[in-house]
Image (cartoon, grey):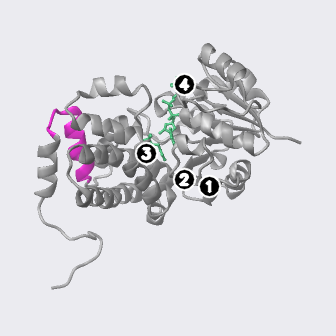
Amino acid sequence: MTQKVSVLVAGSWGTALASVLADNGKEVQLWSRNEEQVVEINEKHTNSRFLKEISLSPSIIATNSLQDAVQDADAIIMVVPSSGMREVASRMRPFLKKETLIIHATKGFETGTLKRMTEVLADELPEMDPKRFVVLSGPSHAEEVICKMPTTVVVAAEDLQAAEAAQDLLITQYFRVYTNPDVTGVEVGGALKNIIGLGAGLTDGLDFGDNAKAALVTRGLAEITRLGTAMGANPLTFAGLAGIGDLIATCTSRHSRNWRAGNKLAKGIPLDEVLQEMGMVVEGVKTTKAAYDLASRYEVTMPITNELHNVLFEGKSPQLAARDLMGRVRTHEMEELPMTR
Ligand SMILES: NC(=O)C1=CN([C@@H]2O[C@H](COP(=O)(O)OP(=O)(O)OC[C@H]3O[C@@H](n4cnc5c(N)ncnc54)[C@H](O)[C@@H]3O)[C@@H](O)[C@H]2O)C=CC1
Ligand SMILES: O=C(CO)COP(=O)(O)O
């Protein structure tokens, strides 16, 4: 029997994942709260606001009804920005079957609570088994996936069967899906790489050069690993797709909204104007604030996050932030490894 999969919501990434599912022969519904967008997807098979000049499979059915999208679904993929995860999860709860597989592909923490997305889902969907919540992450720009360009991602769940069910739903010739049991690591890696992506856009915008960007990515990975490990992640996860893989994609690609936002900030455009101009979610901004607070909660040193926080929210100039990063007290590369003289 054909599996029914619903994707919530029809932003760039949700639409690209709906396309992968359609290519994989699934019966796909794509939910949006925007009536005009639903009509456009169903009649013209395009989603022009988010993925210009791309034709979508006519088998993707858009709907405005959350009940229709949720009630008969074998699996639901939640791709709402982190700021909307709790609201959408709570609204879908009355229509949800216990057996439905819940996957999320959102990269961020909840503002205020600092919770990971599977923790937000567990709060709002208490009838569901949290071990079966799946997170999908990795280097995957919607603009490339929608063109069927070769892409690899990772799905993580505590329950291996749930991760494998997600892998089965999505794996295609051009979309290769790995499994990983480390939900915390995959969520933390996916969220924190956006901070470094913003920093990479700033670095490139200020013409700091290739050495600086390599340093940012490498030392960024060090602080992601430090916080992630303190939160219970397996450090090896950060050597994988949700860690270094996504850092490379985000920090080197003009598709990245975080990179582009950082690049605009380097030109002196104020943050609120940058976000307005982007018109799409830039998760790294809220994640910088969350990571700054998490670093304090877990007593972990995160110098890049700290300086980016100062640039975004305290009015510090990026040049001064870079100078202060370079001028930090000298240290050795692997803090955990004892040094001998
Ligand atoms: N765009 C990409 O290539 C990738 C994005 N992601 C992640 O996916 C998530 C979504 O990103 P995009 O699809 O790129 O965002 P987007 O900016 O393209 O679209 C977001 C959509 O969510 C809708 N929305 C926002 N709050 C909502 C709410 N409370 N209820 C219902 N709809 C709501 C907006 O109206 C918009 O249609 C983010 O966490 C992002 O980090 C992950 C991998 C790749
Ligand atoms: O997560 C992404 C690619 O893996 C998308 O990154 P941006 O949100 O910066 O566009």
Tell me the element at label 2.
helix
- For this rendering, which residue is in front, 112 or 11? 11
- Mark 1, residue position: 158
Q: Mark 2 vs ligand 1: CB under 8 Å?
A: no
Left or right for 311, reference 259: left
Look at 61% across and 34% down and name the residue there: 15
Residue density around tag 2, few if under 14, some if 14–19, many if 20 or more, within 10 Å: many
Task: State which tag comes first along the sequence, 3 or 1.
Answer: 1
Q: Position of residue 178 (x, y in %)?
A: 62, 59
Left or right for 114, reference 210: right
Residue furthest front in the image: 53
Which SS does the magenta portion mostly show? helix
Tell me the element at label 4.
helix
Q: Position of residue 305 (x, y in %)?
A: 27, 47
Callout 2–callout 1 Cβ contact below 8 Å: yes
Left or right for 276, reference 90: left
Q: From which residue to which does the magenta span run? A: 302-317
Task: State which tag comes first along the sequence, 4 or 1.
Answer: 4
Return the mark for residue 87: 4
Tell me the element at label 3.
helix
The CA span between labels 2 and 4 is: 22 Å
Task: State which tag comes first along the sequence, 2 or 1.
Answer: 1
Return the mark for residue 183: 2
252 over 59 or under it: above or below: below
Residue density around tag 3, few if under 14, some if 14–19, many if 20 or more, within 10 Å: many
The CA span between labels 2 and 3 is: 12 Å
Tell me the element at label 1.
loop
Q: Mark 4 vs ligand 1: CB under 8 Å?
A: yes
